[in-house]
Image (spheres, helix red, strand yellow):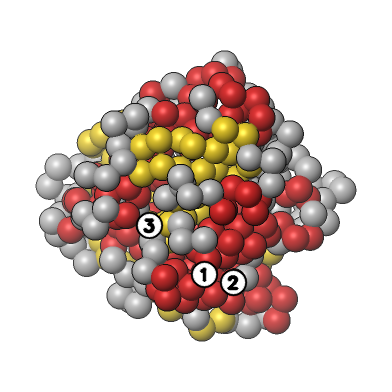
Amino acid sequence: MKKIRFGITGSGYMGRTHAEAIKNLSSTAELVAIWGGTRAAGLAQSCGAAHEPTLEGLMKRKDIDAVVITTPHHCHIKEVMLALEGGKHVLIEKPMATKVEDCDQMLATAAKHGLVTGVAHNLRFRINLPIMRDRIRAGEIGSIQSMHFSMIRQMANVGNFGGNKTGWVNQPEAIGFVIDGLPHGIDAMRWATGANVRRVAGFCRTYTPGRAIEDTTVGILEFDNGAICSVHTTQASHGFFAGEMARVIINGSKGSLDMDGFGDLHQTDREKGWRRISTQPPVMADDPESAYKIGRMLAFNNQIQSFIDRVNGKPSEVATGADGRAGLAACLGMLTSNAENRIVTL
């Protein structure tokens, strides 16, 4: 297997996360250079990588095969296009972009150059969601009838890891929390069931004082397998909301699955009743360095390895650019539904 040489754009919380994951995969990955943000030079030094002073310089490097994009959402399109035009594969932090048209441009350019686009949906690589998917594929809960996803967070901080997004996420170019939090849920439900979102309706509001854009969305989705779904995403809660940081409930004709993405996965049916079938080790804690320990990092390690597998032409479960586009389209559809007071067909 070819070792993949990486560059990273961004040096905040997610920039460091991906840098640590690449370091943890020294036999298949190498971190070459980092660009972007006030912490880039320090992060590069701590990782034994080069600090690239310009974005263009990073993308022109011949010793980089792939770039991980971890900058603010609205910056993705420029950085991804420069990477693709420079012949580099890309792994993009969700959301893939802020416009569906930007996703289409990325996908067309990647196809033109024969390059891989991946989107970072790390729930696929935690403990519970793959088990949920396996149970559904095995037919244990029957045909899918209804689903629910919730992501309830406090605006001020998530954990105590530092680098929280208190600045740029309040600006209009960030669009709203719905495109930051809900893509995880859309991807989880699509990946677990194999179904696609067909229609959406959304009610979007802003409750946080001083915030100019959406912080809360409650919506309804219809999938092409006939399942109906409710979603609730907000950054306007008042502290930690146990079990609701990334919760997926899937009801079928023979049983149900209830997943806390940061806790337990339960299954229930008439024969065996309610039971816990797996547990995700805790990933949130008071110690800032806990974010970079194995409880959280295992998923990111596995995600980078899966991306490397895709680049090397091997089977891979990393979310594709098409998956990233589908999640963004559903989220933006809810904003359109709210603005135009109608159901939106995707």
- Residue visible at 82% across and 51% down? 211
CB contact under 8 Å: marks 3 and 1: no
Q: CA distance from mark 3 to mark 1?
A: 15 Å
**Residue that numbered label 1 is attached to:** 106
How many numbered marks, from 0 up? 3
Q: Label 2 is placed on what type of residue?
A: Asp
- Residue visible at 68% across and 80% down? 341
- Select label 3 or label 2 by which is in front: 2
Does residue 133 lie above or below 194 as drawn?
Answer: above
* Helix, strand or loop status at disc 2: helix
Tell me residue 30's x, y (percent).
40, 35
Mark 3 and mark 1 lie on one chain; the one further toward the N terminus is 1
- Select label 3 or label 1 by which is in front: 1
* Helix, strand or loop status at disc 3: strand
Q: Which mark is residue 319?
A: 3
> What is the residue that sits farthest to the top in this orientation?
287
* Residue 178 in sight: no
Q: CA distance from mark 3 to mark 2?
A: 17 Å
CB contact under 8 Å: marks 1 and 2: yes
Front-most of residues 16 and 178? 16
